[in-house]
Amino acid sequence: MRKLNTILSVLLIVIFLLHGVLGSFMLLGVSSISGRVLAYIGMILLILHLCIGVRLTIQTFQTKSGWAYKKQNALFWTRRASGLAILILAFFHMGIFGSVEDGLYILTPFTTVKLLTQLLLLAALFVHLFVNVRPLLVSLGVITYKERRGDLFLILSILLLFMAGSIVLYYIRWQI
């Protein structure tokens, strides 16, 4: 079960990064490809990841030491809270930029509330990825995870900042 969750996690990270970069280029006006198909695949994988995560959480609480574990481990709750935030904010993300009407894509005004929800989504993704990189690398069998973790932090930070910057620039263009 945990190995399947590891594979799903890696696939989700790759799909999220591809969708995020493609969407960022679209917001910047450089491309017209948003990666919508990637988003649909990502949502299916996200639901599977959620189901496995809920099952593993229940298994943790079913053990005798699970109840002590839940009170003492802040990372345990950070992982669950950031995952729940991602799930909720992902639903706000769907269709936030526009919709298809009569075969045409119609943009909707990008308001301050929409900006905040998208930045919160990126923040939740940032937290969730960064508290889960170490266990992910351990699950993948990467022994020198400290060195690899630093590399991943740098790459993810740059990509997330690029995505946040493109969202902010898109918001500024709507305000002008």
Image: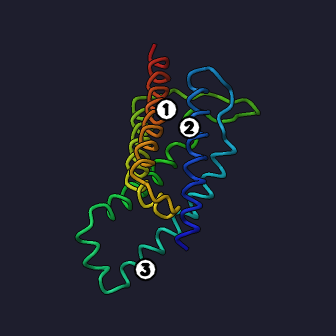
| Residue drawn at point x = 39 percent, y = 35 percent | 116
Q: Quadrant of residue 61?
A: bottom left
**Left or right placement of residue 168 versus residue 29 in this view:** left
Residue at the spot 66% in from the left edge and 52% down from the top edge: 41
Callout 1: SS: helix
Residue at the farthest front position: 144
Q: Give the residue type at disc 1.
A: Met
Residue 133 locus on image (x, y percent): 43, 53
User: What mark, if any, has residue 163 been given in the picture?
Assistant: 1
Q: Residues within 10 Å of mark 1 (few under 14, many from 20)?
A: many
Q: In this orientation, which residue lies closer to the viewer: 4 or 59?
A: 4
Tell me which colouring the rendered structure shows.
rainbow
The quarter of the picture where the N terminus appears is: bottom right
* Above/below status of 48 relative to 26: below
From this viewpoint, which residue is outermost toward the right? 103
Q: Please state which amino acid type lies under the numbered disc 2.
A: Gly
Mark 3 belongs to which amino acid? Gln
Identified at 49% across, 17% down, the residue is 173
Q: CA distance from mark 1 to mark 3?
A: 36 Å
Secondary structure state at the residue bearing disc 3: helix
Considering only vertical position in the picture, is 98 above or below 137?
above
- Neighbour tally class for label 3: few under 14, some 14-19, many 20 plus, Cα within 10 Å: few
- Nearer to me, 138 or 93: 138
153 or 42, which is in the foreground? 153
Q: Position of residue 155 (x, y in %)?
A: 47, 38
Q: Which residue is mark 3?
A: 59
Give the mark nearest the N terminus, 2 or 3: 2
Where does the image place residue 34, in percent across and percent down from the top left? 65, 34
Q: Secondary structure at mark 2?
A: helix
Among all residues in the image, which is located at the extreme top?
176
Q: Which of 121 and 110 lies nearest the eye of the viewer?
A: 121
Mark 2 — residue?
A: 20
